[in-house]
Structure formats: C-alpha cells, structure tokens
Image: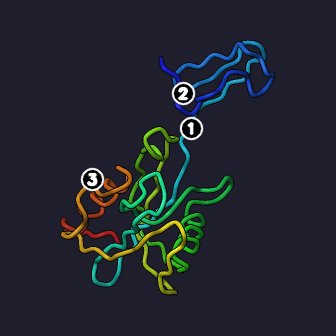
Amino acid sequence: MEASPFFAGWRHCPECGSDRLQLNGSKASCPSCGREVYANPAPTASALLVDDEGRVLLARRAADPGAELWDLLGGFVDEGEEGLAALRRELREELDVEIEPREFLGAFPDTYGDDGVYTLNLYWTARIASGEPTLSDELEEVAWFALDALPPREEFAFSNTVAALETWGGRVRSGRPAK
C-alpha cells in the first residue's frame, strides 16, 4: 500500500532516528523503538454566512491553493481549539466581523490543494452579528450569492466547498433551510 502524502519526505523515525521506518498507507511504524504515527486529517472550521435574503457570502481567494477561485470563509483549527472558537477567530481574521453560528451543516473530507494535506472540513451556517466585512490579505473579494445564482463548480477552489453548498441548497429546496 502506498504511503500517505502526510509522510512525504519521512526517512527516519521521529522518535529514535532509526532509518528502518516502515510506511504503509496512513501508518508509519518503527521496528527499532515501536513508535507508531498515523496520518490524520487537519480539521478546518468554515461558515456559510447567510443574510436575511437567504444569500450566501462567498470569498475569492488571493493565494494558492485555489488563487482567484471562490471559497467559503474559514480556516484551520489550531491545536487545542474548539471548532466554533476557530470559526469565530477565522471570520474575525478574514473579514473583521463577529458571527452568530447557527446550525452544524456537516463534515466533508478533502485535500488542501492537489498535493496538500488531507482535511476534515466542518461547516456551520452563521449570520454576521456585528461589523461590516473588511477584506484581509487572504481575500480578493467577497460577494453575496442567491442559491440559484452560485458560480459554476469549476470556479470553486475546493470540492468540500461545493459539497457544503449542495447540502445547504438541498435543505433550502426541501423547505427545511439551515438557519
């Protein structure tokens, strides 16, 4: 089984330095000291910011991966940080707004770029509680989109963004919109 991209460049055991490291799928093990390391996805927290008209706020990314493509707002969860705390922090950093998280929408796996780390992307619906969106250096632009006027799939940076929007759209169309 091919080793996970997580282990790219690993040649020696991180515990004892042995060069007998065995890489198998998502597991690295060292027969010298018994250390085992697993490739786990990096968690992210993102928001579908929805306004009173039912539109969602999308952001055009300024840098790779996915420069100039659309995305939802959010980012990586720091070690020891709760998901909703990460979500609030990321929206303050990216837009300088305070948000009111609403409903947990789902968790969608992906990779961060073509050869990037595996991610587990947690999504909540949310509303802006205070502040006016002000772009950080990470963003080129933001725009509100109605569900029936979203950009085409190929204009999005990540497949998890499309999956989250489709899940949200399915709920809206079925008459049980995410709050």
Please give the residue where the numbered disc 2 appears in the rendered image.
Answer: 26
Pick the residue in front: 92 or 51: 92
Sequence-wise first label, 3 or 2: 2
Using the image as rendered, state which of residue 150 and residue 163 is in the foreground: 150
- Where residue 92 appears, as percent x and y from the top left, is 57, 75
- Callout 2 amino acid: Ser
Mark 2 and mark 1: span between their CA atoms? 8 Å
User: Which image quarter: residue 166?
Assistant: bottom left
Q: Look at the picture and state if 75 lies above or below 8.
A: below
Circle 3: residue type: Glu
How many numbered callouts? 3
- Residue 81 place in picture, x, y as percent: 65, 59
State the colouring used for the structure image: rainbow
- The reply, left or right, for residue 90 in relation to residue 159 is right
Number of other residues with Cα within 10 Å of mark 2, as a class: few under 14, some 14 to 19, many 20 or more: some
Q: Earlier in the sequence, mark 1 or mark 3?
A: 1
Badges 2 and 1: C-beta atoms under 8 Å apart?
yes
Q: Earlier in the sequence, mark 2 or mark 1?
A: 2
Determine crowd level at label 1: few under 14, some 14-19, many 20+ residues with C-alpha closer than 10 A: some
Helix, strand or loop under label 1: loop
Kindly identify the residue that appears in the image at 61 percent across and 60 percent down.
82
Give the position of the C terminus as an image quadrant: bottom left
Residue farthest along the bottom direction in this orientation: 131
Q: Secondary structure at mark 3?
A: helix
Q: Please, what is the three-letter code of the amino acid marked with disc 1?
A: Asn
**Disc 1 marks which residue?**
40
Residue 172 numbered tag = none
**Label 2's element?**
loop
